[in-house]
Image (spheres, helix red, strand yellow):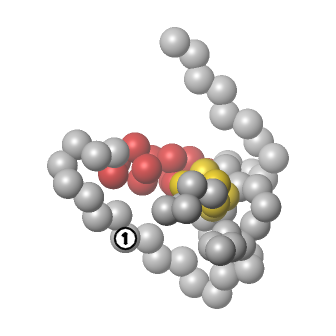
Amino acid sequence: MDSSLDEYGPILFRHESGKMCPFTPNNPKQDYGYNLYIARPRQGKSVLMNASTIASTMPEGCLLYTSD
């Protein structure tokens, strides 16, 4: 099952089958983009929303480095 629009993307999701699915926020191949984050408390919704925001504001090909 191919559930991804691109072969690469700044965010990676894992499909139920175990396949990696790259995700590009504001993808030009999509006509619209709505994201709904539903999970139990403390399951990483805020981290995912922040990663999506950073990925959508960074230019394509830009790498984000973090340090300990």
Q: In the orientation shown, which residue stands out farthest toward the front?
A: 17
Q: Identify the residue position indicated by label 1 in the image.
A: 36
Residue drawn at the location 52% of the way across and 12% of the way down: 68
Q: In the orientation shown, which residue stands out farthest toward the top?
A: 68
Q: In the orientation shown, which residue stands out farthest toward the left?
A: 41
Measured from the top left, where is residue 37 in percent x and y?
A: 34, 64
Using the rendered view, name the quadrant where residue 26 is placed: bottom right
Using the rendered view, name the quadrant where residue 56 is placed: bottom right
Measured from the top left, where is residue 8 in percent x and y?
A: 76, 56
Note whether 36 is above or below 20 in the view shown: below
Measured from the top left, where is residue 12 in percent x and y?
A: 60, 51
Which one is in front, 25 or 40? 40
Residue drawn at the location 65% of the way across and 74% of the way down: 1
Residue 43 at least partly seen: yes
Q: For mark 1, does the 10 Å Cα neighbourhood hold few (<14), some (14 to 19), or many (20 or more) residues?
A: few
Residue drawn at the location 64% of the way across and 87% of the way down: 31
Which one is in front, 28 or 18? 18
